[in-house]
Image: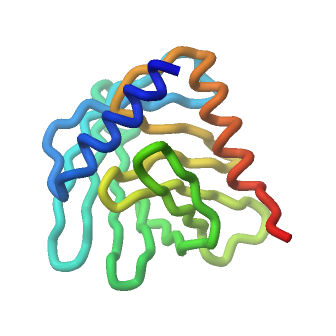
Amino acid sequence: MKNRYLLCCAILFFSCSNKQQDVPVYKYALEQKDSEYYVLNSDLKNGIAVFKYANAKDVLQNLDLKFIIEKESLNLNQEIYTITSKTYSSASLEFKMYQKKDVKNNISTLVFNKDYGLLASVSAEANFVLLKDTITALEKEVFFKELFINLNKIKF
């Protein structure tokens, strides 16, 4: 519980600025035991928030995310994602969920907040979270369960 509180404080701290420089980010994949280290740099230019996640070991793993503010859509590595009605809430921020347009068999969902950046990707291909703090294996499991519950929530 203490680590969750620290995570929420970190999210709040980093969300106060539109520009983030050399922010350490840890990628936790559901399918992998160890985390990967990334460096986040973001900026706001001409109505587009740009988030660049640079992998410390493999440039092919870099993520280039653009948030088009006017359309409220995401562009991740040339794939377009549109906003859905689903959300994920942490203690301090609300994240919106975005899905690919024109998807027939494989739904891919991004969990995003314009101040924080990309929190998670959930799809048949890869499931991961990007956190600005380290977590344990148990915390990772709980985090993914919460995401899946929010993604699959049925409203009556």
Q: Residue at x 24, y 41 (%)?
A: 13
Viewer-nearest residue: 55 or 154: 154
Above or below, 98 against 6 in this view is below
Q: Residue at x 17, y 53 (%)?
A: 17
| Quadrant of the image occupied by residue 84 | bottom right
Q: Position of residue 108 (x, y in %)?
A: 64, 58
Q: Is residue 77 left or right of residue 148?
A: left
Q: Nearer the viewer, residue 83 or 16?
A: 16
Residue 111 screen position, x and y as percent: 52, 54
Decide: is 89 above or below 8. below
User: In which quadrant is the C terminus drawn?
Assistant: bottom right
> Quick check: can you spot residue 58?
no
Q: Where does residue 145 sit, x and y in percent of width and height?
A: 70, 36
Question: Which percent across, then down, holds residue 153?
Answer: 77, 57
Q: Please identify the quarter of the rendering in which residue 50 is found.
A: bottom left
Image side of residue 141 versus residue 75, left or right: right
